[in-house]
Each structure stands twice: as C-alpha cells, then as structure tokens.
Amino acid sequence: MRATVRHLSQGVAIYGAGDAAVQIVNLLLLPVYVRVLSKEDYGSLGVVLAIEMIARIVSRWGLDGAFMRYYHDRPAGGPLERLTSTIVWFIAGADVIVFGVALAASGWIGARFSFQPPHLLALRLMLVNTFLISLTFVPYHSMRLRHEAATYSGLVFARSLGTLLLRIALILWLRWNIAGVFAADVIMTVILLPILWRWFAPLVRGVFSWNELGTVLRFGLPRLPHGLAQAGLDAGNKLLLNRYISREALGVYQNGFTLGTGVRFFTSAFETAWAPFYYATAKQPDGRMVLAKMATYGFAVLSVIVALSVAVSREAVLLFLKPEYLGAVRVIPLIALGMAMQGAYLLASIGLNLTSRTQYYPVATFAALAVGLGSGLVLMPRYGITGAAIAFAASGFTQALVAFGFARHFFPIPFEAGRILRVIASATVAAVAAIWLVPDMHPLVSFSLRALVTVLTFLLLLAGSGFLRKTERAFALEMLGRLRRKRVALNDAGAE
C-alpha cells in the first residue's frame, strides 16, 4: 500500500510541479496586472476564456480520451501508428473547417459581446492558438502512458514559464491589453510544435482506417457533448452572467473566480497522474480497495484546500487585487466548493471509463449544466455574482452525484464514506476556527495565520477523530522521523 501511495503522489508531484509553480507566479503577478487592466478588460477576458473552453473541447472531438483508452488496448487489433494517424487526420480535417468558419464569424461574435478592438484581437488569437494545439495531446498523452513524467513536467514548465514571460512583456511593457494573453499563447505554441515532433513522428503515417475511426468515435463522440457541457459549467456560467450585470462587475467575478480556483493546483496535476494510475490499478486483485483508499486521500486534499480558500478569501482579495474588488470575497468560497466538486467527480466517475460506459458522462454533465444554468436564471438577476457562484457550486455537486450513481452501478468501488465525512467535517470546523480565532490584521499577517490555523486544526481534528488507521499512523510517524533525521543531518553539515 505504501508503494501505491508513493507511486501516485510522486506522479502528482512530478506532473504538477511545473504547471503549479508557474500558476503560483502568475497569481503573484495578479496585483501587477490589475494596475494595467481595467475591470472591463477583465470582464471581456472572462468572456474570451469562456469561449476558449468550448473551442478546446470541440477541437479534439473527444478523441484525446480515445487515444489514451486504446493506446495499449486496441480492439481493432491494428498497430498504434494506424490508430494515431486515423485520429490525427480526422481531427486536422474537421478543425480546418470548424475554425475557418469561427474565424470568419469572429467579427459578428465580437459585435455580439460589444468587444473593443483589443478584445476582438484576443478572440481571434485564441481561435488560432486553439486550432494549433488541437493535436498536442498525442505527444503529451504518449509521455504520460510511457511514464515519462519528468519530460512531461519539464515541457509543461517550459511552456508555462515562456508564456508567463511573454505575457509580462506584451501586457505590462507593450500594453497589448488582453490580446497579449493570447498572443503569448500563439508564440509559445509555434515554438513548441517542432519540439513535440519527436513524439509525433513515430506515430503518424500517411494511413487512414475507417474501422479504427469507427472504434475511436464510438468511444470519443459520447464524450464530446459531455465535454461541451463540462465547459458550459464554467463558460456558460460567465456568458449567462454577462446578460445581467455590467462588464465591470463581470470583471470582479472573473478575478474572484480566479482566486477561487486554488483547488485546480491539485486537480490539474492529480487528473494527469490519476488516469494512467487507475487504468493500471483496476486490473489488480485488490484494485478496487486501493482505488477507494486513494479516493479518500484525494477528498482530504480537496477539503483542506476549500477550507483554506474560505478562511483567507478576504485577505486574498486585498493581497492580490485591490479593495475595489472586495465584492469577490463572497464568490471565492463558492467557486472553491464548485471546483472541489469537480475534483470529487474525477474520483467518483472512473468506473465509466474503466467499463467504457462513456455514454453516461453526458447524462451527468448535462444534468449539472441544467442545474447550473437553471439556477443561474433564477439567482443571477437578483443576486448577481453571488447568484452565479451559488449556481456554479450547485452544478458541480450535481455532476459528482449523478456520475457517482452511474459509475457505482457498472464498477462499484467501496468508497470509505465514514472517513470522507470525517474529512469534510474537519475541514469545515478548521475554516470556521481560523476565521473566528484570527482577527483582521494586515492582510499578509492575517493570511498567514489563518492558513496556518486552518491546516493545523484540520490535521488535529483528523488525528483526534480516529481517521488514521494503525498502518497510516505508523507511516506518518515514519515520514516525520525521516524529516527530523534530514533536518539534523543538515544542521550537522552546516556546523561543519
């Protein structure tokens, strides 16, 4: 069991290190960006990012998941090169048509959203970049499936760092407005594509198989409406809100949404490592039990991040934004909760992938979309950005619950409900305790103290509630002992 935990945690750490490091730097630069970009700019940025989420799903036609599913296990019996080539040529042909039409219609789309010229340019650059990256899942998935985690993380880090530096230059120095965000993306994509050819070249040939296409489309196409609905949970939320509030208020919501997505530091890395892990683990004799335990640990991480987001929401706004953005404080905890529910969905729905029952994904996601947009229609006109955040959280809860119901039917996993409830209760008490015990002080001091109190309270409550099993307590004590010995060794080395 220890080896299993170590394997997954190392995968999460390696996959997430590069991306998370740059996301943190990006967050630290937010105080600089808000002095250059107006609330209206951020509102328009939120709209373009919402459209981008939908465009990215369309660009891959659900076949990125099919590539991973059949990389090792190909029902058609053909070589991997034929499978990959079929996917590549289909996506390339389809996307030329779709994105050609989208670019031709970009002027109409910009007028529909009352974009200023820099915002329209941002929209067009986003469409170009989305088209260019539509096939990059082939090399990236290949790295993951071949356990080249360090290479994957290195490339992600290099791309993220390069994009970050370009955005600083284009937004802060050249004042390209939000067009600089997407111009940086295009430049880095053009630089990166020749580097990724090393992983493309062995897999792509001048061949095409209708049988292979039928196989991957049967797996992938049911994921397309699911993916569109998934994007609609975030994108539709902002596009609908745009109807009821000013672009400036939408800018407040956009930045509150950004500060509420701290959960994604974990889920983006976890999702990358999780899929190869559960595909391999499910085949083992004790696979279901192992997956249940890993899910419990996943819930624990999600819960403590949400607790932190709740405890430090006010301080985060004052540190990273401006006092004029304090309206985002009531948004951040709800967005964090919604994001955590999306993480719970990743944990609860794996049975659908493992049994190739992907046709049920759209059911769960469309149910979530209906709840999110339906409640948004009621709440947004009256409560504005708070109503939008409540609708977002409700959609995440619905998606996780419905997907869990289907997955449990086809591939039951003995999730540890009692332990998960202890995790949630401990996180809730920890957040409330941090807010109650630590008074409002200088934002940096309050931020640090409330974060510390939240984490310590969470850990103490878990330990006191009997959450840890005997083997887990022994493992934790062993890790603490190792850390203590390393610290002593470092001190001795320093003394010499």
Image (cartoon, rainbow, N blue to C red):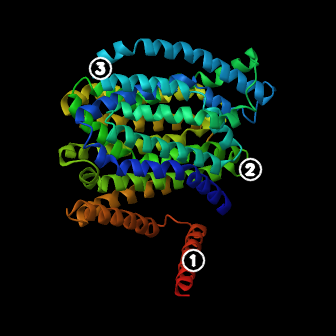
What mark, if any, has residue 486 been given in the picture? 1
Q: Earlier in the sequence, mark 1 or mark 3?
A: 3
Circle 2: residue type: Pro
One can see residue 375 in this view? yes
Q: Compute the Cα span from label 1 to label 3.
A: 57 Å
Q: Position of residue 245 (x, y in %)?
A: 21, 28
State yes or no: discs 2 and 1 in contact (Cβ < 8 Å): no
Label 2, label 3: how far apart the Cα atoms are:
55 Å
The numbered dot on residue 285 is 2
Q: Position of residue 279 (x, y in %)?
A: 67, 42
Disc 3 marks which residue? 113
User: Relative to 247, is 301 above or below?
Assistant: below
Q: What secondary structure is found at the residue carrying circle 2?
A: loop
- Which image quarter holds the C terminus? bottom right
- Left or right of residue 264, residue 274 in this image: right
The three-letter amino acid code for the residue at tag 1 is Lys
- Quarter where residue 52 is shown: top left
Could you tell me which residue is drawn at 67 percent across and 61 percent down? 3
